[in-house]
Amino acid sequence: MRGLLDTPLFNLSAMKELVKEDALYCLVAKDLQNRGHSEEYAMEIIFNSYILDDLDSLAIYKNLLSYKNEKGNNK
């Protein structure tokens, strides 16, 4: 079981990169936006519902997040 300290925080730019590379996440994001939700809200839903429950996606997200933090793009 993961601890709270192991769980990364939501980062919009990292989520955009991850969603762009995954067909399911892209489909879900488009569907949520078509239903009137903002892009950021759609990314938060995907993060909380999909990323945090999937170890492979979480590992990819953490890599994207650390890369963005190294580059200074942590918005």
Image (cartoon, helix red, strand yellow):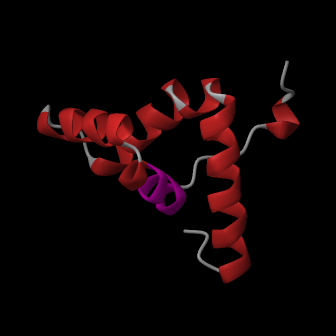
In x, y percent, where is residue 20? 37, 54
Principal secondary structure, stretch drawn in magenta: helix
Residue visible at 63% across and 71% down? 68
Residue visible at 73% across and 77% down? 70
Foreground pick, 61 / 12: 61
Quick check: is 75 in the magenta stretch?
no
Highlighted magenta segment, given as a residue range:
12-18
The quadrant where residue 65 appears: bottom right
Which quadrant is the N terminus positioned in?
Answer: top right
Going by the image, does 4 lie left or right of 37? right
Spot the residue most to the bottom. 71
Q: Image height check: is 54 above or below 42?
A: above
Q: Image height check: is 7 above or below 20?
A: above
In x, y percent, where is residue 5? 86, 38
The quadrant where residue 37 appears: top left
In x, y percent, where is residue 8? 72, 45
Q: How many numbered marks, from 0 up? A: 0
Q: Image height check: is 23 above or below 61?
A: above
Residue visible at 60% across and 38% down? 57
In x, y percent, where is residue 56? 65, 36
Going by the image, does 64 lie left or right of 49? right
Residue visible at 14% across and 31% down? 35
Quick check: is 13 in the magenta stretch?
yes
Which quadrant is the C terminus positioned in?
Answer: bottom right
Foreground pick, 37 / 69: 69
Going by the image, does 15 lie left or right of 67? left
